[in-house]
Image (spheres, rainbow, N blue to C red):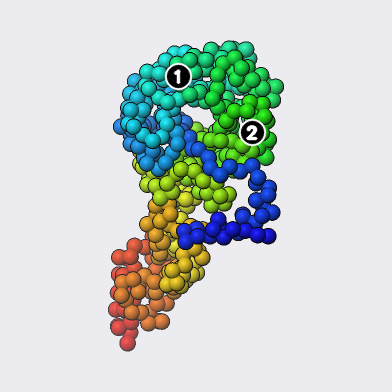
Amino acid sequence: MSQSKRNWRTSEHYVSFYNYLSEVRESLKGLPKKIAIHDVTLRDGEQQPKVTFRKDEKIRIAQALDEAGVNRIEAGLPSVSPDDKEAIKEIAHLGLQSKVYAFSRCMKTDVEAALSVDVDGIVMEIPSSSHLIRDGYGWKPEDAVNRSIEATSYAHAHGLKVTFFTIDSTRASMDDIRRLVGRVAKEGHMDALALADTFGVMNPQATAYFVKKMKALLHKPVEIHAHNDFGLGVANSIAAIMAGADVAHVTVNGIGERTGNTPLEELVMSLRFLYGVKCDIKLEKLRRLSKLVRSLSGVEVPPQKAIVGDDIFTVESGIVTGWWKRLEMLHKPLEMYPFVPELVGHDGVKIILGKKSGRDSVLYIAEKHGLQLSDASVDDVLWRVKEKAIAKKRPLSEEEFLELARQSQRHAQHTT
């Protein structure tokens, strides 16, 4: 039952040592030491209904992604609009450390549009399940194969790195996917294969099985593009990486069509601290990046959202505040949190006053403002805090708390 403490506990994080027991690690033999992150916020993220990024906003997000250490940025589909085409070209000319990719259909005209914006590579999509090819596109299966061979060959011949992106591959029969991927690998071109769980319908075990089959078939890099329809985007991406996937596709805050894509922040933190898999993401940039995308997309996240939610380091419960009062004095925040706020760019722990507050909550805020309260006063102020919070149906501001404390003091003076 040996384990390495530096993996499960440092001055910045504290997770379960069971993650790193030798018996557990034995089952994770396929895990790489490091993976690459391919961000699709500017393309798949923008496909979320009601989200529109203007050219200048796309550039701001691309710069922030680059600063955060994203390896590849999928900047968009050039044929969507002239504004998008200009944005992608400008991003490609920013001199970013991140590689800049365009998205395209398997069409020579889309490849030419990608070439005109000077990107490093191209993600080329094609439907791969026979039912979607037939019912969604009105094609014959051979149409998808022939279009893919022609377009990927053309992109490769003109110097683009090609990631072949198989739409709905997780609902395609093994015969269908082998036929399509096998022929494109031999007769067309792919530098990597992106397996798209387009409708988020895989479980982690099936994802691992599928990735292993594709790795054995191709002997090429495999990328995982998971959607979150059953809330398993992160789990499926991790399962794919365990099975040999080299690149994970993500969006900031998990934005995207329907229920969204694998959230960048949740995946990289889980990989780093629960599995010991590194990537180039600068963790301290995650909160700022999240807030930028929220602002420009207009899509808020739940306040309790893992890693970047506004209130994950906010405490209202009196019991938990009592813990924090002691732990703060002992400089031991990791007894209460799996990672310190500053690790991902949060400001720190915040105590608020509301219906669930207790005596420790009142004492904590009172001490912060230099107020001396008797035992009786603490109980009276707490009663007033709860009463007003219930009436207002929200926590109270510190100014409201101070006014209640003054009211309590006046009441105590009047009754003595």
Looking at the rendered image, the quarter that the N terminus falls into is bottom right
Q: Amino acid at mark 2?
A: Val
Residue 53, by quadrant, is top left
Q: Earlier in the sequence, mark 1 or mark 2?
A: 1
State the residue position of label 1.
Answer: 159
Q: Is residue 43 above or below residue 25?
A: above
Report the residue at 30% width, 75% height from top.
370
Residue 184 x %, y %: 59, 18
The quarter of the displayed image where residue 347 is located: bottom left
Local secondary structure at mark 1: loop
The label shown at residue 211 is 2
Q: Secondary structure at mark 2?
A: helix
Q: Amino acid at mark 1?
A: Gly
Question: In this rendering, which labeled residue sits more in front, label 1 or label 2?
Answer: 1
Nearer-the-camera pick, 376 or 285:
285
Residues 234 and 356: in front is: 234
Query: Vertical placement of 204 versus 162: above or below?
Result: below
Q: Is residue 236 visible?
A: no
Q: Residue at 70% x, 22% y: name it.
A: 175
Q: Position of residue 71 (x, y in %)?
A: 45, 36
The residue that appears at 34% across and 32% down in the rendered structure is 95
Q: Is residue 56 visible?
A: yes
Neighbourhood count class around disc 1 (C-alpha, 10 Å): few under 14, some 14–19, many 20 upward? few
Query: Which residue is most to the bottom?
Result: 416
Give residue 185's position: percent from left, percent from top: 60, 20
Instruction: Check whether the beta carbons of the residues at disc 1 and disc 2 lie within 8 A of each other.
Output: no
Image coords of residue 356 (percent x, y): 47, 65
**Quadrant of the image for the C terminus?**
bottom left
Q: Residue at x 39, y 39 (%)?
A: 65
Query: In the drawing, what numbered circle is on residue 182?
Result: none
Q: Quadrant of residue 200?
A: top right
Determine whether, in the image, residue 304 is placed left or right of residue 88.
right
